[in-house]
Image (cartoon, rainbow, N blue to C red):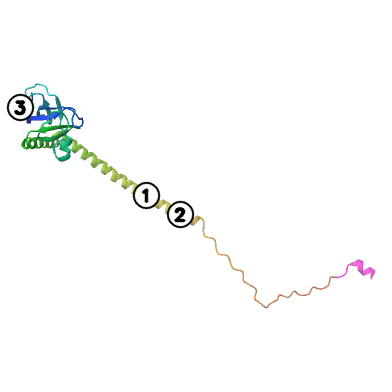
């Protein structure tokens, strides 16, 4: 049986075997206790208040909760044999969901408050705070590294742009632009270039003897 000094909350609740989803399960009365074990809280239930060994134990996490079902959700939870009257509760603890029924509104509110406070204490525990601090430190280091990489990337881009401009300048110096061609002047209209007459060629010796 749970140590009374470590017990945070306790009381009788009706619960159904198999958790929240199976149909046709029988509702049974069980003794639920919420106990503190060191820095964690555990929900457990027994067949009787004096039973030394619990039937199940569920360790609370920061996301654990106990909520009250109403309307259609409460009607769907009325499945099963020997379903009692009362307030329908849904415990969501460590990935496990279990339906329960409390005999009164005050009993239901007591469980909702107790589970909520225990889950909040898990969040505020030193171990969890230390893990959160480690995560924050790692995020800060990653952010600083990303900023440094962005700074280096910007510097490399600027250097690449300067090199591109220098290469273009060197190409312009090595390959001067060609000089423009001189346009040929057209001949003035109305002028004809006259060719002077050529003197007759002198006769050769053979032709002179025949004459």
* Front disc: 3 or 2: 3
Q: How far separated are the C-alphas under marks 1 and 3?
A: 69 Å
Specify the quadrant of the image occupied by residue 102: top left
Residues under numbered marks 2 and 1 in contact, where contact means CB atoms less than 8 Å apart: no
Determine the secondary structure under disc 3.
Answer: helix
Residue linked to disc 1: 157
Is 165 displayed left or right of 119 in the figure?
right
Residue linked to disc 3: 4
Q: How far separated are the C-alphas under marks 3 and 2?
A: 85 Å
Q: Is residue 204 magenta?
A: yes
29 is higher (above) or lower (below) than 135: above
Tell me the tag on residue 141: none
Q: Is residue 26 magenta?
A: no
Picture coordinates of residue 108, whole percent (x, y): 9, 36
Picture coordinates of residue 2, whole percent (x, y): 8, 25
- Specify which label sits upstream in the sequence, 3 or 2: 3
Is 105 displayed left or right of 26 in the figure?
left
Quarter of the image with the N terminus in it: top left
Q: How far separated are the C-alphas under marks 2 and 1?
A: 17 Å
- Specify which label sits upstream in the sequence, 2 or 1: 1
Specify the quadrant of the image occupied by residue 206: bottom right
Say which residue appears at 4% left-offset and 27% top-offset.
4
Query: What segment carries the magenta color?
Result: 202-211
Say which residue appears at 11% left-offset and 33% top-offset.
101
Quarter of the image with the C terminus in it: bottom right
Residue linked to disc 2: 168
* Front disc: 2 or 1: 1
Determine the secondary structure under disc 1.
Answer: helix
- Residue 8 visible? The answer is no
């Amino acid at each position: 049986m749970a140590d009374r000094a470590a017990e945070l909350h306790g009381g009788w609740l009706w619960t159904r075997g198999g958790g929240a989803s199976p149909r046709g399960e029988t509702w049974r009365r069980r003794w639920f206790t919420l106990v503190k074990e060191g820095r964690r809280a555990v929900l457990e239930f027994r067949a009787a208040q004096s039973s030394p060994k619990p039937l199940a134990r569920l360790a609370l996490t920061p996301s654990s909760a106990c909520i009250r079902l109403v309307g259609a959700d409460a009607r769907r939870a009325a499945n099963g044999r020997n379903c009692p009257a009362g307030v329908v509760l849904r415990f969501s603890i460590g990935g496990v969901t279990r339906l329960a029924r409390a005999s009164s509104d005050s009993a239901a509110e007591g469980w909702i408050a107790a589970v909520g406070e225990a889950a909040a204490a898990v969040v505020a525990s030193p171990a969890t705070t230390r893990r959160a601090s480690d995560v924050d430190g790692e995020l800060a280091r990653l952010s600083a590294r990303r900023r440094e990489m962005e700074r280096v990337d910007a510097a490399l881009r600027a250097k690449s742009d300067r090199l591109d401009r220098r290469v273009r300048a060197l190409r312009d110096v090595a390959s001067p632009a060609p000089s423009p061609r001189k346009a040929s002047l057209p001949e003035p209209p109305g002028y004809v270039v006259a060719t002077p007459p050529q003197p007759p060629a002198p006769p050769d010796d053979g032709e002179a003897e025949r004459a």
